[in-house]
Amino acid sequence: MSVIIGPQPVKHNIYNLEDFYQFDPERGTIQTRNAQRAVMVSEDFIAGLIAGLDEEVGDAAAVVLYKCGYQWGVADMKKFEATFAREFGQDMQATHINMVMETWWWPLQTMGWGSWEVDLSKGDQGIVVVNLYDSAIAKTLGEVGKPVCYLYAGMFAGVMSHLARRPLSGIEIQCYAMGATYCRFVVGAESRINAVEFWLEEGASASDVLAKL
């Protein structure tokens, strides 16, 4: 028999259904461990939301989704910064960036937004590359022949902007909805992202873009 004396360590690996969500059947609400309100939706809901937005604003739907994602990313990272300090007892800005990124993303992966890899090897050039697997939007819409993950592009740009303390932009350079096996994004200064957009319009592939950068 063993005896444990003193306070128990804080549990960080809370990313499963039982640990992460708090269900309140009486109120009909779901909250995450971090006291964020959550809603469970079907793929039909996502597809309908995208289709409805396309019908309402046409080509501007991409811009709307990007801006929504950007604001979401900034707001979520601000809240996460306070949560991180409370949970780990240290300033997020003084923590290794890989730990910060993975700790921030895990709750989103738990909620069904997919898994990711962050490539910081081009950081000296002011570029961050994100590989996203199982995009909730692209997987739902299927192969439609065009990039569809504008919400993610905006979210990644918002998150990186908060961390860098300066405005950054993001763009998807490879999408599951175009037949790729996963989605890929580039985040950097607006001038760099404008150049990436031009290369893509000229027919450059994701590997071409990364080589140019």
Image: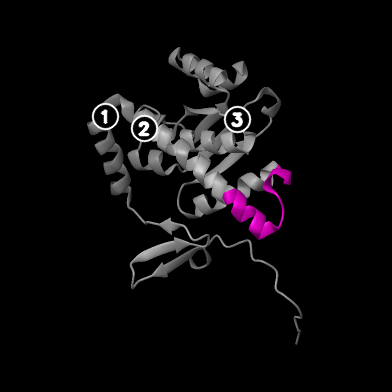
Location of mark 3 (residue): 166
**What is the distance, in whole Å, between disc 1 and disc 2 at their CAs?**
9 Å
The residue lying at 71 percent from left, 25 percent from top is 124
Tell which residue pokes out farthest to the top in this image: 202
Where residue 11 sits, quadrant-wise, is: bottom right
Location of mark 2 (residue): 64
Which circle, 1 or 3, is nearer the viewer?
A: 3
**What is the distance, in whole Å, between disc 2 and disc 3 at their CAs?**
21 Å
Q: Start and end of the magenta stretch?
A: 80-96
Q: Position of residue 33 (x, y in %)?
A: 52, 62
Towards the viewer: 146 or 75 = 75
Where residue 13 sits, quadrant-wise, is: bottom right
State which tag comes first along the sequence, 1 or 2: 1
Which mark is drawn over residue 57? Answer: 1
Q: The residue under label 1 is which amino acid type?
A: Val
State which tag comes first along the sequence, 2 or 3: 2
Q: Position of residue 105 (x, y in %)?
A: 56, 48
